[in-house]
Image (cartoon, rainbow, N blue to C red):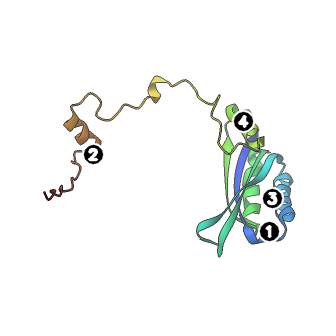
Amino acid sequence: MPVQLYETLFLLDSNKLSADPDAVKGALHATIERHGGRIEVGRPWDDRKLAYPIKKQKKGTYYIAYYRMDSAKQHDMDRDLKLNESVLRYLTINIDPKWADAVLDVARNETAAAFALRGMHDETAPTDVTPTLGEGLPEGEAVAAATGGRRPRREPVAEKAE
């Protein structure tokens, strides 16, 4: 199987991470390397309050890692990540090879909070153009087309006392 570039966003237990950050990050990196992965970039991303408790935790730290791995071994690594008590959740995606260099450049840049889209725009194909709903229709019909035939509800206008 070919070696692919993957991006995994980990949601880590903040309590365990604050107690021993090097051990938690080392365990994540060791899990990836144990399955034949080579880590390209790994760094903390964000620390925030969760919308709902996950495994009785109300706060989590996001950690992002980019690594290359044989795609056949990804399933085995997923099983090991589910057993890691420091990992609350994780999401892994496969990076398209044509974007790999650009994504890694942005990931390595410490000031890449605002993702730079330069160089990532393809020319718009004619099939990619979405027509504007109601284009070329009179105003009343365009509103009807945009709202699925329903007219927008209008609030009664209060008369001014003179």
Mark 2 secondary-structure assignment: loop
Mark 3 secondary-structure assignment: helix
What residue sits right under mark 2 in the picture?
147
Are the residues tagged 4 and 3 within 8 Å (C-beta)?
no
Residue 152 picture location, percent across and down: 23, 49
Q: Earlier in the sequence, mark 2 or mark 4?
A: 4
What residue sits right under mark 1 in the picture?
18
Are the residues tagged 3 and 1 within 8 Å (C-beta)?
no
Q: Nearer the viewer, residue 43 or 156?
A: 156
What residue lies at 78% left-to-right and 42% top-to-bottom? 108
Are the residues tagged 1 and 2 within 8 Å (C-beta)?
no
What residue sits right under mark 4 in the picture?
100
What residue sits right under mark 3 in the picture?
28
Q: Earlier in the sequence, mark 4 or mark 3?
A: 3
Q: Quadrant of the C terminus?
A: bottom left
Task: Name the mark nearer the viewer: 1 or 4.
Answer: 1
Task: Name the mark nearer the viewer: 1 or 2.
Answer: 1
Of all residues, the one furthest to the left in this rendering is: 162
Q: Quadrant of the N terminus?
A: top right
Q: Is residue 81 above or below residue 95?
A: below
